[in-house]
Image (cartoon, rainbow, N blue to C red):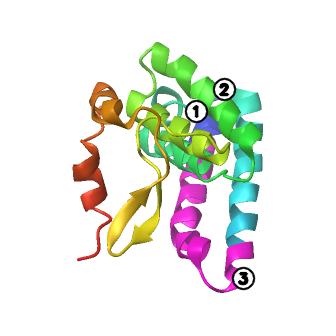
Amino acid sequence: MASEIAALARELTGMAEADHRGARMANSEDPAEQLEWRRLTTRHADRLNELMDAHGWPTADLVGEEAARAAWLIAQHADRQLDVQRRALRLMEEEAAGGHVSPRDVAFLRDRTLVNEGRPQIYGTQIAGVRDGAPVPWPCEEPERMDERRAEVGIPPFDEYVARFAAP
């Protein structure tokens, strides 16, 4: 069993490394690169779904911090497979209730899933783009409470967060 879990951890981290290498293709002006990004994230989401069938959510307790973070990244980028994102979110919420998953990671995936469903996000973690050098977030439910909700899950205030995306 330990060797199976070690192999699972290596597989997840390998997928995350491929994701990082391919991320530039997500917003490429080249349609072939965009298509390659979609194929990559689809393959990863399909595999994550299989892994969730076999193991539930791959927590740090099961696969280690790096591989658990990789699973979260794969779920984040499963934008065209809402069934996988929703399932990952549900499993992560269950594990977060027991203290096995970071509420911060759950918040990011919740916002990503809401945006992909065409609904307002809760924590303001998803940026739609940059206009005139300033980050433009997707719409947020109750924006006046956003920083309060962010603090509850360990995310810095919105202005601090978007400053990382601002043009120099």
Please state the horizontal and vertical placement of residue 43, each as a whole percent of the image. Answer: 75, 57
Residue behind mark 1: 58
Residue extent of the magenta highlight? 8-35
Label 3 or label 2, whichever comes before in sequence order: 3
Mark 1 or mark 3, earlier in chain: 3
Q: Amino acid at mark 1?
A: Pro
- Give the number of the disc on residue 31: 3
Residue 36 falls left or right of residue 17: right
Relative depth, front residue between 29 and 47:
29
Image height check: is 40 above or below 137?
below
Which residue corresponds to mark 2? 56
Q: Kindly state the secondary structure of the residue where label 1 is placed.
A: loop
Question: Mark 3 is on which residue type?
Answer: Pro
Q: Position of residue 154 (x, y in %)?
A: 29, 32
- Mark 2 residue crowding within 10 angstroms, few (<14) / some (14–19) / many (20+): some
Q: Amino acid at mark 2?
A: Gly
For the residues labelled 2 and 1, say whether their Cβ atoms are less than 8 Å apart: yes
Looking at the rendering, in which quadrant would you find the N terminus? Answer: top right
